Image (cartoon, grey):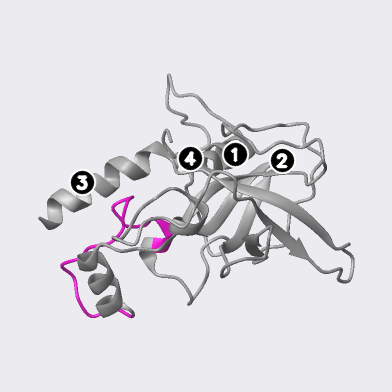
Amino acid sequence: MGYRMVVPANNRPKGEGEVKVEGYDLRRIMMGVVEGQSEILKETALPQESNIDYMGGIDFRKGCYVGQELTIRTHHTGVVRKRILPVQIYGSGGNTKLPVAFAYDPDSKLVLPPRGSNISRVDKKGRSAGKWLCGVGNVGLALCRLEVMTDTVLTGEGSQWKPEHEFMAAWEPEEGREGGEIRIKAFVPSWHSSRAEAQKLHRS
């Protein structure tokens, strides 16, 4: 992810590259890094669902904060069923293929869903698969049920995901915005696997 620095305007560090905020936002979205209250679902999600545990943002030895008991219990059971993941959107036309590799298209003309739009399987089977959070171009972040939208196996029951499953977000028209529908595919970042393995070793 690089570094973020706060320095006086007349004393910029030497040898450090500087990128525009749009480039930073795109990079963190593609890495699956959530930021701020506009993306983290307020009062409805565990810190682990926003990957705050993977980024070292939770002290599991500290007590006396709101939600501490549930956060600690979830940590020790090792089962976090939903996490924010990078996703790629694509059209639902007959010539549109399911993305195989995660890729940003700066020329995308696809319409992004409203924040909080429900994600479900295209065939309408099963429960809600997640919620759309934000995006740019054809990539974004969504809170995803891991065993529904990815091949992640959390329990002995196994994953419900199959390669042919497709997911979508559909929304109704509202003031100043037309209704629409878009297909969504989730991708698990490689750094999730290494952090998950480190947590397993720590718990054992």
Q: Which of marks 3 and 1 is nearer the N terminus?
A: 1
Q: Which of the 4 image quadrants contains residue 83? A: bottom left
Q: Mark 2 points at which residue?
A: 137
Name the quadrant of the C terminus: bottom left
Q: Name the residue under label 1.
A: 26
Please, what is the three-letter code of the amino acid marked with disc 3?
A: Ala
Q: Are marks 3 and 1 in contact (CB under 8 Å)?
A: no
Q: Which of the 4 image quadrants contains residue 51? A: bottom left
Q: Which residue is drawn at 28% across and 45% down?
A: 195
Q: Which of marks 1 and 2 is in front?
A: 2
Q: Is residue 177 left or right of residue 120?
A: right
Q: Mark 4 points at which residue?
A: 31
Which percent across, then down, holds residue 40? Answer: 51, 63
Please, what is the three-letter code of the amino acid marked with disc 4?
A: Met
Q: Which of marks 3 and 4 is nearer the N terminus?
A: 4
Please, what is the three-letter code of the amino acid marked with disc 1?
A: Leu
**Overall secondary structure of the magenta stretch?**
loop
Point out the stretch of residues depicted in magenta: 49-66
Q: Which of marks 4 and 1 is nearer the N terminus?
A: 1
Q: How crowded is mark 2: few (under 14 residues within 10 Å), some or many (20 or more)?
A: some
Please, what is the three-letter code of the amino acid marked with disc 2?
A: Gly
Local secondary structure at mark 4: helix
Quote the CA–CA distance across marks 3 and 4: 19 Å
Q: Residues within 10 Å of mark 3 (few under 14, many from 20)?
A: few
Which percent across, then down, holds residue 73? Answer: 23, 73
Q: Do the residues labelled 1 and 2 touch (CB within 8 Å)?
A: yes
Quote the CA–CA distance across marks 2 and 4: 15 Å
Give above or below for 71 relative to 133: below
